[in-house]
Amino acid sequence: MSFTVVARYRTLPGHEDAVLSVLDRVAAASRREPGCLGYRVHQGTEDPRAVVLYEEYATEADFTAHCATPHFQELVLGEVVPRLESRDVVRCAPRPEVSA
């Protein structure tokens, strides 16, 4: 069973291009991590300052390991977070499928 993270960011005015550029680098590095099943960066179509990350890992431990990587520490915490107005991270586990 996989482990999913949805992160919702709102950039400071005028910082969306810089944030997206850094997140593109983070996504490329993250996709090479063991246990990373997918890492997608999305930008709002109605609000370009809205950024949504959709990350999927094999296990929660893989996500925890992701947060300890140099690219997360240096790029996300060091370069992205200071350019954000808000940040919300939701950790999710899939619900079991129910047959009708």
Image (cartoon, rainbow, N blue to C red):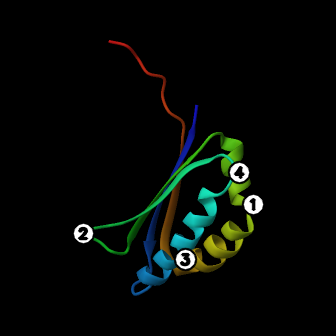
Q: What residue does disc 1 label?
A: 68
Label 4–label 3 contact, CB within 8 A: no
Left or right? Give the position of 38 relative to 13.
right
Mark 2 lies on residue: 46
| Mark 4 in CB contact with mark 1 (< 8 angstroms) | yes
**57 w.r.t. 9: above or below:** above
Query: Residue at horizontal 37%, vertical 13%?
Result: 99
CA gap, disc 1 to disc 2? Answer: 33 Å
Q: Which residue is mark 3?
A: 22
Which of the two discs, 1 and 2, labels the residue nearer the N terminus? 2
The vertical placement of 88 against 18, above or below, is above
Q: What residue is shown at x 66% (from left), y 46% (from top)?
A: 35
Q: Earlier in the sequence, mark 3 or mark 2?
A: 3
Q: Position of residue 71 (x, y in %)?
A: 68, 69
Disc 4 target residue: 64
Does label 4 or label 3 sit earlier along the sequence? 3
The mark lying in front, picked from 4 and 3, is 3
Quadrant holding the N terminus? top right
* Distance of label 2 from label 4 (alpha carbons): 32 Å
